[in-house]
Image (cartoon, coloured by chain):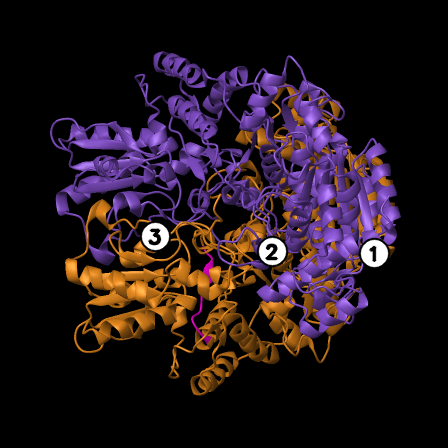
Chain colours: A purple, B orange
Amino acid sequence: MASREQHDRMANAIRFLSMDAVEKANSGHPGLPMGMADVATVLFTKYLKFDAANPTWADRDRFILSAGHGSMLLYSLLYLTGYPDMTIEEIENFRQLGSRTAGHPEYGFAPGIETTTGPLGQGLANSVGFALAERHLNAEFGDALVDHHTYVIAGDGCLMEGVSQEAISLAGHLKLNKLIVFWDDNSISIDGAVNLSDSTDQCARFAASGWHTIRIDGHDPEAIGRAIEEAKASDRPTLIAAKTIIGFGAPTKAGTKAVHGSALGKEEIAGAREKLNWSYPPFEIPSDILDAWREAGVRGASVREKWEGTQSDKRAEFDRRMRGELLPDFSKTIADYKRKLAADKPKVATRKSSEMALEVINGFLPETIGGSADLTPSNNTKTSQLHSIKPGEYGGRYVHFGIREFGMGAALNGLTLHGGVIAYGGTFFCFSDYARPAMRLASLMGLRSLFVMTHDSIGLGEDGPTHQPVEHLAAVRAIPNHYVFRPADATEAAESWQKAIESTKTPSTLVLTRQNLRAVRLEYTDENLTARGAYELAAAEGGEAKVSIFASGSEVEIALDAKKILEGEGTPTRVVSVPCFELFEEQDKAYRESVLGNAPVRVGVEAAIRLGWDRFIGSDGAFIGMTGFGASAPAEELYKYFGITAEAVADAARERVKNGVPQGEDARQIPDSEPARPHP
Amino acid sequence: MASREQHDRMANAIRFLSMDAVEKANSGHPGLPMGMADVATVLFTKYLKFDAANPTWADRDRFILSAGHGSMLLYSLLYLTGYPDMTIEEIENFRQLGSRTAGHPEYGFAPGIETTTGPLGQGLANSVGFALAERHLNAEFGDALVDHHTYVIAGDGCLMEGVSQEAISLAGHLKLNKLIVFWDDNSISIDGAVNLSDSTDQCARFAASGWHTIRIDGHDPEAIGRAIEEAKASDRPTLIAAKTIIGFGAPTKAGTKAVHGSALGKEEIAGAREKLNWSYPPFEIPSDILDAWREAGVRGASVREKWEGTQSDKRAEFDRRMRGELLPDFSKTIADYKRKLAADKPKVATRKSSEMALEVINGFLPETIGGSADLTPSNNTKTSQLHSIKPGEYGGRYVHFGIREFGMGAALNGLTLHGGVIAYGGTFFCFSDYARPAMRLASLMGLRSLFVMTHDSIGLGEDGPTHQPVEHLAAVRAIPNHYVFRPADATEAAESWQKAIESTKTPSTLVLTRQNLRAVRLEYTDENLTARGAYELAAAEGGEAKVSIFASGSEVEIALDAKKILEGEGTPTRVVSVPCFELFEEQDKAYRESVLGNAPVRVGVEAAIRLGWDRFIGSDGAFIGMTGFGASAPAEELYKYFGITAEAVADAARERVKNGVPQGEDARQIPDSEPARPHP
């Protein structure tokens, strides 16, 4: 064991890299890296299973800095242990444009950054997915290939965020005993002392959700080591409450909020150098200490090498899954299923046709894991192959996430980041609002996390406006790098699932109806038309199109009915199905122009607000949809009440064909109907 | 005390109204009302302080059905106790268009519905605001005017949602001992047994956050009464864990998930009638039982009458606050402040000018309560008059909400719903994603909840894309009935606050910069121009405008600089400031047309995605903004990197003046720059 002095000097290396980098950037958070340097030093030099030179080793322990503002802790560790790409220049360029050392750790920016953190609580919630993926793969591939821990550093902020409760109650329930969380118990938050706003007994709280808990002095390396060993021996996930001094080593600011989130200043740093007996200039680590750190970085090399040679009849399959490669006949499997759909023309809700597609996909791809936030019978997410994952029994492929939409979203991200699985989870689309912060991070990281969102409009009926999405399509479409699929029938649902699964760098949200929809794709096409984002579903008949109707999901059949009305009156009308705005934007200009077409009258129809539809119909187009919240009543009545009908579409088109398209403010839609409120 | 038999019959009245209403609607949730009927009967007949005929009595106890899907419990209670408007016809019209008995309880639909619930966890989180408002007003107005309890019924779903942790940890910390929560501990959720997904010891969890806890048999009226008395005597908030049988009384479905969320069916209901010895037809309550209930409904009448006569030198002020009326000179106060700003022309961040406005407002209106989710020094939400509310000391006007954005949002709604206060809370705009579900409910309910969102763009700089809003302006603007203000300088910030506070039926979000902005409103105007939503800030000089530039917030000064460039080249250019999209839509057509103007070239600039801006610039307008996520770097560099500069605006305008406005797909903006990622 390293001497206490060496430990201290190694920990101080983290402290000074952090102080100096924040000082140079004149921006950042030195408090956490300085406070947690001892914990991190013990963990990385003695316990964490990793091989810095091979950061993608599948069986490495995962280290997650949930308190992402302390990013310099992670960057320091990656530099000191010798991870690729994390040079001293990167440390010196902390928080500068184009550096790998962003203000908060960003997945993909440098090896060793396992997830993007910063939005508090989410790293902790990701870790449930990481730990679950490990146990799940272990159940199938055995200890020789999969046997690693997930370590987390969480701060007071992570624990105050509600998502932490969703995470710890799920992890505790599932007895994910290879999950070990350090809580940086420094009693300080931005407003001041934590006890300004909180007096929770965190250990008691974690224990209430089935965790093992240990309290230690976070500056005592021996206690840290003992705690890790105790945690590894536990049959439950473990919280190690590490009492620390934020900004440990800063002579006047340590233990205060002043050290949390800004540069310490020259004088304070000079004082720290004196106090900690650190005589080296900024960004210089003495060679004996750097050597000791680099040794820690190769500690796991021999274990990894041995692991690389592990023979198993499941090895090839394991490697395929960890590479994230689909089985070769995936597209053929979908094509066969689409042929069947073209023949059967089922009239089902898209939540049902999503289930039908999943039945095919889950049967073919053994790497899928599904789940729901306690809406399994409504989201239709559990297919015949999927058995429930239970505490201690991780071989199943279905997660009862509980009523925890945000925790589910973050766990999906963790499952995806771990690798080896393709994960999806369901809830009502209205509660995408709850899961949204995780959906955003999936987009930012470029993860194939899959969100199944059913009950996608007023079509859900009687549950009323609290459960009826109106603005959610626009709001999720607003997130960059996120595919929002709203399929119109079973074929589009199958195509949506295919494209979602094939898109390894973009998360997808499937937005699905509760109510039945008739088939609108009546013939088999080899091409995945949904993957085009929008396409002409029905050409105009009887001449050049005078009207183009654009619609998505449940409103496509309304558009087709409107076309029938209009063509019955001699107005050639085409219908464009728009299952995915984002994919349409990825098409080339010629394709986009052909889909938008030249019809003088354009009408959009979607049971949601107009926002975003001007892209298809222009500012002067007619839009049939919602202008406010929905109401509680049977779905069919609501469609009539809010005027989302084929007749309304035809009326709007007819008016414009007859009188021309109004310009400017005259083209603005005036809400037809107020929400259905009782008389006051 | 009523006999057990009478209690049972009174409780059964709830059960059968609920069963029969759900059956008639063929939709709804009978399980909770049947399971919690005993608790509700004891509470409403013996403890709840209310006078059904006077449902807005300021000192009534509040009853909040957090598990809003059990709405028939609430509707039954309101009907049985004789609340105005809740007729038997409304019960028979459960979940029908235009009825007061929506699928989930909707605030404003009938007296006695204290808040809209359904999105799980939020009623519980509202209750923290209710209970805090009570204690705060009590501190100022005394026991004679303010002395009431807040009772909540929460289900397993409410407790699994993360927001519940934020709520209970804040309530426990603040020792809100007049908050009493019943947990309907029925062990059933939609997927099946709760133990499919959770094994938390809820009592231990609440105790860890400082709650008193009591476990009872939820079908034992005496135990229920004793628990309420014990809770009322506690110096801490209390959780009463009521063990119940979901769907109590249903002969074959009770205690199973089958009774949670659908009609029981004729046979099951017939069986329940037999089992519970209830021989009356649907919707008929025997007169002795209805009489007993109606008696309970007038139980509080004499107390209320006595309360109405309470004399106090603060009575008039209390009544004013509860009516939600502003002090008469509010607008004059703002006008005086605006005069000062026009003279001073401060160059400050809008988060700072928001604070300056709040300094004036909080000094003038004693009913404001502010707070922040642990970002007080960043959000600038604490003015000189506001002292912190502390456990047991509720006279302050500032809440340290902790790192609990969603809990804060829901508590703001509860504060607002209680009445007597005007409540605002702050966080980073990026974390509006966390608070969003509460922001939506504020909009749906039509509440004056006020959200202060600072660090509103890439202008926050080094914290990077996890903290940089890009899609959030579009996403919050998408919510119906929600004002999103993005002021450009201190005058617009003052006007935003004025309009937000004067808008009693619409929540507002103030979106504010971290970086300094120069004054753009150089002269005093009596009119609140910001309340127009958009207005011409600078007219074209040197001829009729050839270019209109539309901008909000920090980009208005960029627009003004671009105008200078263009006019220097002989191109008359006008600038329109657009602080609030929603208010612009409320203006009349002539005003809107005058603001949009007739310049052939239109350019929009906002450091966010384009979504929504076509409304001002048309589909073929040029937009200078973001197309993806931001990056970590100093703010000025980011503006340059992402090309959001006066030069870029001028370039786009010049190109269009010279070559004409491109049409169709040629007008689509091609992203100029990818996000700043390090080289792979």
Above or below for A253 versus B457: below
* Chain letter, disc 1 residue: B
The residue at the point 81 percent across, 45 percent down is: A240
Which quadrant holds residue B599?
bottom left
**Residue at the location (59% across, 48% down)?**
A86
Q: Residue A91 bears which disc, if any?
A: 2
- The residue wearing badge 3 is B672
**What is the secondary structure assignment of the residue under circle 1?**
loop
Residue at (73, 73) in percent of width and height: B140
Placement of B224 over or under B535, stated as above or below: above
Range shown magenta:
B481-489
Residue that mark 1 sits on: B236
Q: Residues within 10 Å of mark 3 (few under 14, many from 20)?
A: few
Chain of the residue that carries numbered disc 2 in the rendered image? A
| Quadrant location of the N terminus of chain A in the rendered image | top right
Q: Give coordinates of residue B544: x percent, y percent.
A: 17, 73
